[in-house]
Image: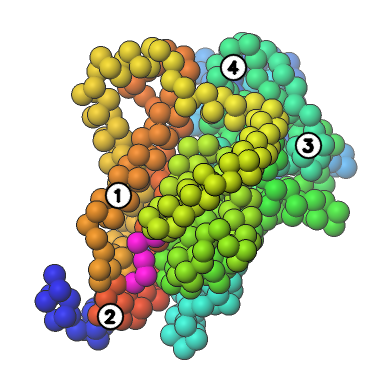
């Protein structure tokens, strides 16, 4: 290996990576522009969770917000048979009572051959984006027809032309241009804290608005918890019956619900295609970004109505995990920001705090600088930090935790000296957040002590033995604080109980060791593969960021036992998370709910403890090609995801 590394030509490697980077960015840009230019007709439909056919008799009336700038048609879901006869009378009235469109047509003339139901041509009829209309259909003269209705609302789907092709093309070109400028600047100025601040803020603000609202896992529920604190909303525990039962959570006797303003409910309806306005988990995630819907909502006057939504799993949690979001939302509330934008404001709050924590980590441990840059631009990690999911907050907490130990070791700080007190105070603050957010992560928070080396660990242990009363006092204080948190956070108490496995768990594990081993190993591998497969930006590019990370971690003198220890620690933490994924009911070891590759992201910080960079050869290579790696990762990801989110 050493001979191979010594033969490497730094310039040749740089040229190869540069060529690959330019080619990848060009391919992504061209494909993105072609895709945008091919966008044609989009649809938007807000539909209740449970919709059923009813006989089309009498008058049906329902309001809708005009979403598209160039609306083509309104489609009313229904069934028109060959035997359906009669004339349909229709009328569209705006919010001021003016008639925008009215008429009478034979029911067979407004029948759509592909979609079925009623098709009303409205292009060029004066419908205005952002205006609320009421559509009235009179079926008094119609026989043998059904209309699909949910919660007394007709299913009205809007068809409209995508009118933002030029804007989107300019955005793609701007992404590439700004990335090139960034690349030139970073080679001139280096990738220090100031450049990091500017880069992550610019990229982050773009992601906050381009990424579909509440598109990350559980993001809407997490956003609700922060918003509840800002708006002083109390949850309502109720039994959900009928078709909604069983869709929203795990509580057999009912669920925690909250009544939110109209615009807060609309945040989860900012996608396009079919949107289901119900309680279920699928109703809490947008898969696409509908710029027309957001523009229409901002143009329209907000309705003075509320909607009841599920706050399963977060309603009773404390606000510690959401402090960054809450603080910025309170400022936005005082400034009179529209509620429809509160979700984006909350995202910015979390992102800003994450960036500041990582800047502090760079100051404490300069040799972690390169790895912090790499960790920041792993797409899945960046998306989490720019979301309302506190898992992104946890990533930055773990980075800052690691920097504390690197600072102490590099500066040869005595672990029991006065100089170490600020570091330990910061450490206690950080592990408080770790504890209230995800108890199993305490393993890595405590395990980092081992990075200080056996001499420092032994010294700390001796101090504990020689100051038993002080240790007990500190311990009692931590326990009391922990109990106070647990009392406030009932869900955290449940997590603590996982450390004491029920007897049926133990019996199953003892009786099925091979199955358990396969499950743990398989899940570990599966999550790790998903982590990196999620980095490929629609498979346009195998990111050179991984090559840079490997070069950085090739230490000149890295004892094998230390590598083995970190691998063991990493695997142990993942296994504990898997255990926590089980419920306290009789175990179902074939399925683990709530476990995804995003839980691995904070553990990647363990790799930073294997730094500094490798030998002189690998360090020189890594430092030169790292900006290229970040350039291509950032650019290709932004282009491909921006286009994918929008079409």
Q: Can you identify the residue that label 3 sits on?
A: 261
Give the mark nearer the N terminus: 4 vs 1: 4
Residue 574: % across, % down: 37, 39
Task: State which mark lies toward you, 3 or 1.
Answer: 1
**Disc number placed over residue 616 in the picture, else none:** 2
Helix, strand or loop: magenta stretch: loop
Give the mark nearer the N terminus: 4 vs 2: 4
Residue 321: % across, % down: 64, 43
Q: Which residues are magenta?
A: 609-613
Give the mark nearer the N terminus: 3 vs 1: 3
**Disc number placed over residue 548 in the picture, else none:** none
Task: State which mark lies toward you, 4 or 3.
Answer: 4
Give the mark nearer the N terminus: 1 vs 2: 1
Q: Is residue 1 visible?
A: yes
Q: Is residue 458 left or right of residue 528?
A: right
Camera-side residue of 627 and 260: 627
Give the mark nearer the N terminus: 3 vs 2: 3
Residue 351: % across, % down: 61, 58
Distance (Cα) linking label 4 and label 3: 25 Å
Distance (Cα) linking label 3 and label 2: 59 Å
Camera-side residue of 49 and 625: 625
Give the mark nearer the N terminus: 4 vs 3: 4
Q: Can you identify the residue that label 4 sits on?
A: 251
Check disc 1: other Cα within 10 Å, few if <14, some if 14-19, many if 20+.
Answer: few
**Residue at image point 58% right, 62% down:** 417
């Amino acid at each position: 290996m050493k001979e191979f590394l010594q033969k490497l030509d730094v310039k040749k490697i740089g040229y190869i990576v540069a060529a690959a980077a330019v080619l990848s960015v060009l391919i992504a840009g061209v494909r993105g522009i072609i895709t945008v230019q091919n966008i044609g007709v989009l649809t938007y439909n807000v539909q209740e969770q449970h919709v059923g056919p009813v006989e089309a008799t009498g008058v049906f009336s329902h309001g809708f917000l005009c979403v598209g700038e160039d609306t083509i048609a309104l489609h009313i879901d229904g069934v028109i048979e060959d035997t359906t006869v009669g004339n349909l009378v229709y009328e569209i009235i705006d919010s001021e009572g003016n008639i925008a469109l009215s008429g009478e047509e034979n029911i067979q003339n407004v029948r759509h051959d592909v979609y079925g139901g009623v098709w009303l041509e409205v292009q060029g009829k004066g419908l205005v984006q952002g205006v609320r209309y009421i559509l009235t259909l009179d079926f008094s003269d119609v026989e043998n027809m059904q209309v699909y209705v949910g919660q007394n609302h007709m299913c009205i789907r809007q068809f409209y032309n995508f009118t933002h092709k030029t804007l989107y093309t300019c955005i793609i070109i701007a992404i590439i241009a700004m990335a090139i400028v960034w690349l030139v600047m970073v080679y001139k100025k280096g990738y220090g804290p100031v450049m990091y601040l500017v880069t992550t803020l610019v990229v982050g603000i773009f992601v906050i608005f381009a990424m579909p609202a509440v598109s990350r896992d559980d993001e809407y529920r997490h956003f609700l918890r922060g918003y509840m604190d800002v708006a002083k909303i109390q949850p309502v525990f109720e039994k959900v019956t009928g078709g909604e039962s069983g869709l929203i959570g795990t509580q057999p006797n009912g669920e925690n619900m909250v009544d939110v303003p109209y615009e807060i409910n609309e945040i989860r309806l900012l996608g396009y295609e079919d949107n289901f306005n119900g309680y279920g988990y699928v109703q809490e995630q947008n898969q696409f970004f509908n710029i027309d819907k957001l523009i229409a909502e901002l143009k329209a006057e907000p309705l003075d109505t509320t909607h009841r939504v599920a706050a399963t799993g977060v309603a009773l949690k404390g606000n510690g995990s959401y402090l960054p979001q809450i603080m910025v939302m309170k400022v936005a509330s005082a400034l009179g920001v529209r509620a429809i934008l509160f979700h984006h404001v909350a995202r910015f709050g979390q992102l800003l705090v994450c960036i500041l924590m990582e800047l502090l980590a760079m100051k404490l441990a300069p040799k972690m600088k390169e790895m912090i840059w790499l960790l920041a631009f792993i797409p899945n990690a960046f998306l989490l930090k720019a979301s309302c999911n506190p898992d992104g907050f946890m990533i930055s907490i773990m980075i800052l935790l690691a920097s504390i130990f690197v600072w102490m070791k590099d500066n040869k700080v005595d672990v029991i000296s006065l100089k170490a007190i600020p570091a330990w105070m910061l450490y206690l603050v950080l592990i408080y957040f770790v504890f209230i957010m995800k108890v199993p992560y305490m393993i890595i928070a405590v395990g980092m002590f081992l990075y200080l080396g056996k001499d420092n660990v032994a010294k700390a242990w001796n101090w504990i033995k020689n100051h038993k009363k002080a240790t007990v006092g500190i311990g009692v204080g931590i326990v009391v604080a922990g109990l106070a948190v647990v009392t406030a956070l009932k869900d955290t108490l449940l997590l603590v109980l996982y450390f004491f496995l029920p007897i049926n768990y133990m019996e199953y594990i003892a009786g099925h060791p091979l199955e358990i081993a396969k499950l743990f190993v398989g899940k570990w591998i599966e999550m790790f593969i998903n982590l990196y497969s999620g980095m490929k930006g629609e498979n346009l590019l195998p990111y050179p960021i991984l090559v840079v990370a490997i070069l950085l971690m090739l230490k000149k003198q890295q004892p094998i036992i230390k590598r083995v220890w970190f691998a063991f620690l990493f695997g142990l933490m993942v296994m504990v998370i898997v255990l926590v994924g089980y419920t306290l009911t009789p175990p179902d070891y074939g399925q683990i709910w709530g476990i995804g590759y995003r839980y691995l992201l904070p553990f990647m910080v363990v790799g930073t403890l294997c730094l500094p960079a490798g030998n002189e050869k690998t360090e020189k290579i890594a430092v030169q090609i790292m900006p290229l790696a970040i350039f291509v990762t950032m650019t290709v990801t932004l282009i491909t995801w921006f286009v994918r989110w929008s079409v």
